[in-house]
Amino acid sequence: MSDKTSIPAFSPPQAALAALSVAHRITRTDADALGDFIATQAAFAALDNIAQAQEMAQALAQDISDATDGFDTLLNLLAAALRDDAAAIAYCLCADFIALHGRVSPEEMRFLERLGEALGIDRLSRAAFDRAAQARATPLSASETQND
């Protein structure tokens, strides 16, 4: 992908959707899982047509990531579209989506690491976001809530 002028820029919501699309491909969850997750997130409330934006972001993310050096190009595009708070929100959304499906694989951890690095999120913040995502995805069992 040497001709970067032919690649459209992402808006922050599109960039977050593209990052989630990559997370979805890595987690190998069913097609409805991502749509269900996106529909419940306040970060996408301002989008007029979430399904259309999701399809566009997925197609573009797949086309870019399938090309030579595509994943690095995609990370660069995401970093250009997501600054400061938007970068943290997109990272947290990906961490939450990945954590929802149970045990986090090494491939998923590597994706989050590379995404966080590309977005300029420091390691301590990434660790806090990851732990918070795990906590939100973990149900409290009756044995964990009993007092000794």
Image: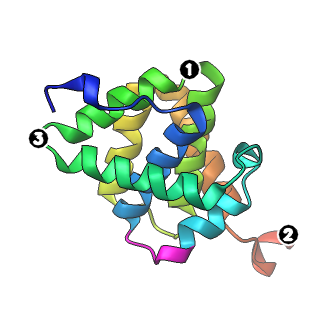
Whether residue 58 appears in this view of the structure is yes
Q: Main secondary structure of the magenta part?
A: loop
Q: Residue at x 43, y 28 (%)?
A: 9
Q: Residue at x 46, y 27 (%)?
A: 123
Q: Please, what is the three-letter code of the amino acid marked with disc 3?
A: Thr
* Rendering coords of residue 22 (x, y %): 38, 53
* Rendering coords of residue 19 (x, y %): 45, 45
Q: Residue furthest front?
A: 6
Which circle marks residue 148 in the picture?
Answer: 2
Residue range highlighted in magenta: 28-32
Q: Are marks 2 and 3 in contact (CB under 8 Å)?
A: no
User: SS class of the residue under badge 1?
Assistant: loop
Q: Please, what is the three-letter code of the amino acid marked with disc 2?
A: Asp
Name the N-terminal-most of marks 2 and 3.
3
Say if 20 sits above or below 118 in the image: below
Q: Are marks 1 and 2 in contact (CB under 8 Å)?
A: no
Q: Check disc 1: other Cα within 10 Å, few if <14, some if 14-19, many if 20+.
A: some
Say if 96 sits above or below 114 in the image: below
User: SS class of the residue under badge 3?
Assistant: loop
Residue designated by label 1: 83
Q: Residue at x 33, y 26 (%)?
A: 76
Residue designated by label 3: 68
- 22 to the left or right of 140: left
Looking at the figure, which quarter contains the C terminus? bottom right
Distance between mark 3 and mark 1 Cα atoms:
26 Å
The part of the image, by quadrant, that contains residue 21 is bottom left
Whether residue 117 appears in this view of the structure is no
Mark 2 or 3, closer to the camera: 3
Q: Residue furthest right?
A: 147
